[in-house]
Amino acid sequence: MIEHTLWINNQWTASANPGWHEITDPASGRVIGRVPAGDTADVATAVAAARDAFESWQWTPAATRADLLHTAAQRLRGTAESAGETLTLETGRLQVRNRLYIEWAAQFFDYYAELARNEIGRIPPSAEPDAQVNLVLKVPYGVVGCIVPFNYPVLLLAWKLAPALAAGNTAVIKPAPQTPLATLELMEAAFSHFPPGVINVVTGGADVGAALVAHPNVDVIAFTGSVPTGQAIMRHAADGLKPVHLELGGNDPAIVCADADFDKAVRAVAWGGYLNGGQVCTSIERVYVERPIYDRFCAALAAFSKQLVYGAGSDPETQVTPLISAAARERVHALVSEAVAGGAQLLCGGTIPERPGFFYPPTVLRDCTHALRLMREETFGPVMGVMPFDSFDEALALANDSEFALAGSIFTFDARRVRRFYAEVAGGTLWVNDPIVDNPAAPFGGMKRSGIGRELGPEGLEAFRQTKHVHWDFEMREKSWWF
Ligand code: NAD
């Protein structure tokens, strides 16, 4: 049984709330840990610590901050084995991938350590001929509230924490109630060398998250999660006129053209749809296949899906891991059942297996239509709805027929189609022949209801810097327009 308290001022700190929140292993359904249920008073304590720390952290030389970020990267790499195991216990995800995600999280600390020491603004030419200078200065906001979803607790935290700290902000983190254990473990194992108060963690659910958003000394909110929570956060942030960065849900399309490398496209689509049990914001959920290869593709995707091994993340044979909870599985199953009742043909999966844990088999439904909720809502499970298309115009229209626009994929070698795909399909990230690949140096985020703002790349640093313009006249020459 893993147990942690809150992390405030570099110390394990008891919560004001004596209650505990239990953490369940999705692969077994067993309780494997607990953290404080959390309280708004905890938020106040953590924000006070972060605010105090900001007073000196904002003036700490960028090179010193960079050294501390590089040290965090190094220490993170040293924890890949142990924190990876904890991540597998709480997320159910493959252990080998969790190790990679810790390594990847480390890369963001290295990347932003270097990026943030390059410049803090620019010098535009003065508008006046006098001896004047204009400085555009980039300065930190203060305290950043980082609110993280259950699916990628450490990785998505790194996308926020690394640029926020590099820019000179301090942070209060609220992990998801389902997956807070690795985050807390890493506070002591990888982040305790930062000055006290620079990084703090409070645990809890929606009430604790809402208290963080509402706290007057929290200056900006960096959120990843669902659309309804994003909307609630934006509403509450309006009271304090706080900037919000919202990385929200998706219902991502993949277009498979007749000229694609057929066998590789089948495997790539399966990868994009089933990675992390389909619980990736950029999972492939809708598949549009060109008519001449439609029947063959559906059959091949189903055959490939059937032989995938689903099981616990700790088992090296496993390919597809469980969903986070019984409730999440019920929701996915309801969408599948509704699709079958609505005319889709179930080719594989679609039943809840009789075994412990929250497993759901890889599921393929063909002949779907956009009347089905499965094709309109975020499924967040290992399920793909497939439809044929006749013209490429139709494929583009189907891909765009969604209120989400997080990411999308195309499989083709036709350059004219690729050009039209990236020009005409809405989405923050568009993949050609290689789904779900991100790059620390390239921005990530959503259009439409998939979010506001961008993480990663220089854009991800800008999210945590605000701008000052300084106009300075060295001579103080009298101006003709003065009274
Ligand atoms: P969620 O919205 O239920 O919860 C996310 C976080 O918000 C949790 O820490 C939760 O406790 C907190 N929260 C809940 N209500 C709150 C409130 N009123 N005020 C402040 N905080 C509150 O999301 P989830 O189920 O943990 O994660 C799955 C969702 O996240 C999916 O929709 C997925 O697409 C999305 N997601 C998006 C991205 C992206 O980068 N765009 C990445 C991963 C996941």
Image (cartoon, rainbow, N blue to C red):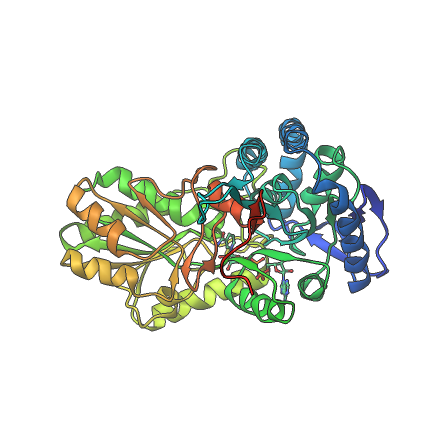
User: Which quadrant does ligand 1 occupy?
Assistant: bottom right
The answer to which of 213 and 376 lies nearer the viewer is 213
Residue 1 visible from this viewpoint: no
Could one spot residue 10 in this view of the protein? Answer: yes
Please state if 13 lies on the left or on the right of 207 as rendered. right
Q: Quadrant of residue 370?
A: bottom left
Left or right of 425? Residue 20 is right
Which is more toward the observer, 436 or 47?
47
Vertical order, 177 against 110 (above or below): below
Quarter of the image where the C terminus is located: bottom right
Q: Position of residue 204 (x, y in %)?
A: 72, 59
427 lies left or right of 148:
left
Tell me where residue 75 appears, x and y as whole percent: 67, 28
Percent position (x, y) of residue 387? 25, 60
Quadrant of the snapshot with the N terminus? top right
Q: Is residue 40 left or right of residue 230?
A: right
